[in-house]
Each structure stands twice: as C-alpha cells, then as structure tokens.
Amino acid sequence: MGCPLGMSSWPMSAYRRLSIPTTLVVTMTAVAPAFPAAAARLVVAPRANARFDYQLGGSYRPSPSVGIVDRDRTSRPAAGRYNICYVNGFQTQDYQASWWRSHHPDLLLRDASGALVEDPNWPGEYLLDTSTAPKRHALLAVIGRWIDGCATKGFDATEPDNLDSNTRSHHLLTAADNLAFAALLAARAHADGLAIGQKNDAELSARARRTAHFDFAIAESCQVYRECGSYLKTYGDEVFEVEYGAAPFRAACNARGGRISIIRRDRDVVARGKPGYVYRAC
C-alpha cells in the first residue's frame, strides 16, 4: 500500500500498536523464516471506536469518515484505510464447497453416515474438521496461505469467521478443537504482521483471547443475543459491532455508541448502490 511497516496512509488515530505476549513472540521467531515479509511489518490493531465499514458482499469506496474497512480476502484493501481481511476459517464458503470436496475431502467434517456436516443457516457452507492436530495442521496449510495472501495484498488484520462452528457440529467438534486451530491461525497472522480478530462466540471470549491471543473482536448481533458485555469485558473498547436490524441498532447505539464502533448493515452486506443496501453508524 506504499507505506512503511505495511500500514496504510490512514492517520495513526485508526491504529493501536500491539504488545504481543512473550510466548507468542517466541513462536513467531520460530516460524519467521517461512514468512520473510513479516520482519518488516509491525502488528497493529484497529483503533477503538474508529468508524467501521463491513463490505463482505462487495467492495466499494468507503465514506471519508470511515477509518476501518473489512473486506473479503478476494478483494483489494481500501486505499488510505485500516483494512481487515475476512477469511472463512472454520467452514467453507458456498462458492468453494466443490473445491474443498475435490481437493481436500478428508478435511471436511462428516457425520457417522459419512455425510458432510452443513451449517443449517448458510446452505453450502460445510464445517471444516478441526478435531485432531494433524487435521488442524493440514487446514493451516490451506488457510494459512490465504492469510499470507492478505498480508501480501496489504491488509492490516484478518478475521477468521465461524469460531463457533463446533456448536453446529452435532457434538463432533469441541470448543477446544476450534480454539487450538484459532491459535494456529493467530500465530500465522502475527508472523505475517497482521492483527487478528475474534469473530462471534461471545461465551468463548476470555478463553479465546487467552488461548489464541486475539487482538480485537467483531461482534455480529450481540445486541440481539445480549452478549455484547462478554466482548467488552474481554476486549475493552476494541470491539466492532455489526447489527442487522433497526431496533437492535438503535438500542446498541443508546447503550454504548459513545464507547465502541457500531454499525448497521443489511444481512447480505451488499455493495453500496445494490438493492437492499443499508449502512448506518452511531
């Protein structure tokens, strides 16, 4: 992006320098030779309460007041902003389901009958199998490259989605399985010079930060599920809240809009100018 340390030209008010735990520094040193670009990058988290835009369904030019942009890993970063790279870290994207079935069928979770386990709310998203250390490392070989790609493109952070996939696994996966994989993803991100955010699963917040060393949180519909307090307790003001309904958004803004960044988006997070597009900020 043409700036030192892999950072965009957005004012430093959009950034927060991280203090990486010593144990993680040691891990990063051990893996650094695999990621030579990491040595020149400083890991920074997004600045708390900077205005946030969630552009997963299509990229568009952010408003001048927006300091933080979240886009899919297939997109380019937004010029002059702090950029978060979305990666579906625990499930397949629907458009990639056939690729996973043909290239890595053994890494997809299957039930006792051999059928793929699908997210009931998102057809075509199949759960990845994080149940054993060998499978977690095999998954890292795939998703870790995606995270490397985020860094190469000039993103500042990544958010691996669906940490809570174990809750949809019919007890085939545990929270510990997913946290162990999250720790691998976080080490890879930090080695690449990227901050990493916890995505959802408020109940695991304290364990997730302790185990995986997440730097911030992106909380979807936490007002609806009455779980925003769990994120705030763990991450302080480093929480970026997305609500999808008018009433929850208003309630969230009234409750904590002066403390953290809160936005309302349409459920399909479509690009501006597309039918159904909604964007509001407190």
Image (cartoon, grey):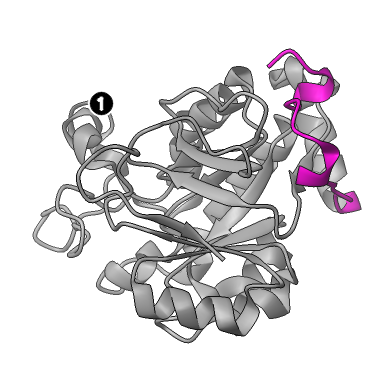
Q: In this view, does 268 lie above or below 156?
A: below
The answer to whether residue 254 is left or right of residue 220 is right
The image position of residue 205, as x and y in percent, is 61, 72
The answer to whether residue 124 is left or right of residue 278 is left
The image position of residue 204, as x and y in percent, is 56, 74
Density class for disc 1 (Cα within 10 Å; few <14, some 14-19, many ≥20) is: few
In the rendered image, which quarter is residue 9 located in? top right
In the rendered image, which quarter is residue 259 located in? bottom right
The image position of residue 12, as x and y in percent, is 84, 39
Quarter that holds the N terminus: top right
**In the rendered image, which residue does mark 1 sit on?**
103
In the rendered image, which quarter is residue 229 located in? bottom right
Q: Is residue 167 magenta?
A: no
Q: What stretch is highlighted in magenta?
A: 1-22
Asked whether residue 15 is in view, the answer is no
The image position of residue 107, as x and y in percent, is 32, 42
Work out whether residue 137 or residue 47 is closer to the camera in this orientation and state it.
47
